[in-house]
């Protein structure tokens, strides 16, 4: 299965509503204000975001179409091109993250977004691309998180730095970064505890991790990646806002896109925060994390070739 087919399959829940909705809206009518209002409502229901929808609506006001299906297909192709155009500036090659050795990455996010699984999948991706890897199990809040990351380390055969549950997560982060620097490991990925942005003590602990890393090197961490769950919709925007108050986010990974009909949230996040999308998760298998491709994402979202 090619990458486009994988994206189409993974985004099918989102695309089913969008593509059928677009055909219903445009197949029987010329584009007038009523049609454009329906178009606007459809995209907002997919969590595309009001600002982006407004811009797309202006673009589509320029169109005059006939009443046949070929014109409807043309409209969907144009929409795909526009979505791709919006997203292209926020496409960032995963391998470009490793600009120095070691590259220290903090993986952040709230509870339940799939941080630890994402680290495992990232580790496999980087190892498949001939990078040396080490994991840091700094989610000491949950014993299960340490065990899960250890399972991934065994599965893909990479080293892991860990401590007992309840120990200082900043200490684990420090040991991981120090080991990576001393042994010239290409990439160190540090797992962190799921933090709700309204829990001050947990967010203070999160700040401490960054302060400790900067004692090793003022540039650490080189990357701070925020993992977002697509099924949370607009709440994902709040998470970007809150985590950005502590440390500059350098990239996003959006998981569970196969479990939501609101894949348009990717556009809303990019439009509002101007942050690169590094990868998207669509499935449970270790290979179900895909480097983000704006053009293929747009085509998959609208189910076109």
Image (tube, helix red, strand yellow):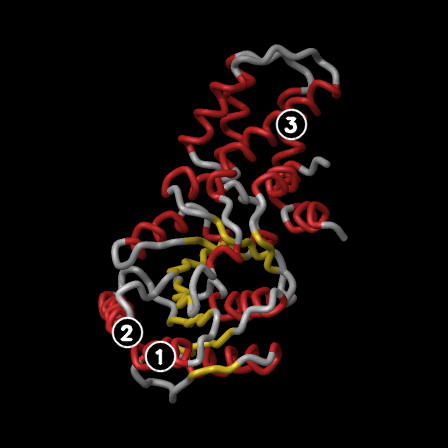
Residue at 66% x, 25% y: name it.
24
- Read off the residue under disc 1: 178
Which element carries disc 2, helix, strand or loop? helix
Q: Tell which of 3 and 116 is nearer to you.
A: 3
Give the Cα distance between marks 3 and 2: 51 Å
Residue at 59% x, 80% y: name it.
157
Image spot of residue 129 (x, y percent): 61, 64
Query: Pointer 3 and pointer 1: residues touching (CB < 8 Å)?
Result: no
- Read off the residue under disc 2: 216
Callout 2: few (<14), some (14-19), or many (20+) C-alpha neighbours within 10 Å? some
Considering the image in quadrants, where does the C terminus appear? Answer: top right
- Read off the residue under disc 3: 76
Q: Quadrant of residue 220?
A: bottom left
* Mark sitting earlier along the chain (3/1): 3
Q: Is residue 39 above or below residue 248?
A: above
Image spot of residue 98 (x, y percent): 47, 61
Mark closer to the observer (3, 2):
2
Mark closer to the observer (3, 1):
1
Give the Cα distance between marks 3 and 1: 51 Å
* Mark sitting earlier along the chain (2/1): 1
Give the Cα distance between marks 2 and 1: 7 Å
* Mark sitting earlier along the chain (3/2): 3
Q: Tell which of 144 and 154 is nearer to you.
A: 154
Q: Tell which of 23 and 82 is nearer to you.
A: 82
Callout 1: few (<14), some (14-19), or many (20+) C-alpha neighbours within 10 Å? some
């Amino acid at each position: 299965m090619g990458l486009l087919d994988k994206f189409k399959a993974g985004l099918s829940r989102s695309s089913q509503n969008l593509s059928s909705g677009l055909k219903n809206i445009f197949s029987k009518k010329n584009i007038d204000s009523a049609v454009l209002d329906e178009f606007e409502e459809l995209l907002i229901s997919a969590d595309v975001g009001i600002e982006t929808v407004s811009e797309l609506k202006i673009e589509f006001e320029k169109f005059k179409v006939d009443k046949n299906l070929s014109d409807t297909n043309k409209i969907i192709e144009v929409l795909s091109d526009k979505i791709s155009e919006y997203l292209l500036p926020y496409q960032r090659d995963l391998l470009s993250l490793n600009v120095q050795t070691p590259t220290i990455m903090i993986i952040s996010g709230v509870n339940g977004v799939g941080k630890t699984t994402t680290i495992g999948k990232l580790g496999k991706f980087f190892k498949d691309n001939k990078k040396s890897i080490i994991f840091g199990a700094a989610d000491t809040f949950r014993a299960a998180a340490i065990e899960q990351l250890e399972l991934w380390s065994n599965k893909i055969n990479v080293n892991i730095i860990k401590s007992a549950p309840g120990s200082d997560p900043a200490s684990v982060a420090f040991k991981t970064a120090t080991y990576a620097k001393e042994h010239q490991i290409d990439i160190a990925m540090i797992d962190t505890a799921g933090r709700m942005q309204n829990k001050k003590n947990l967010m203070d602990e999160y700040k401490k991790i960054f302060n400790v890393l900067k004692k090793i090197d003022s540039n650490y961490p080189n990357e701070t990646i925020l993992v977002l769950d697509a099924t949370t919709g607009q709440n994902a925007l709040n998470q970007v806002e809150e985590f950005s108050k502590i440390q500059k986010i350098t990239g996003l990974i959006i998981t569970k896109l196969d479990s939501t009909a609101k894949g348009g949230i990717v556009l809303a996040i990019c439009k509002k925060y101007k942050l690169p999308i590094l990868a998207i998760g669509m499935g449970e298998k270790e290979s179900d994390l895909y480097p983000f491709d704006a053009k293929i994402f747009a085509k998959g979202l609208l189910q076109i070739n």
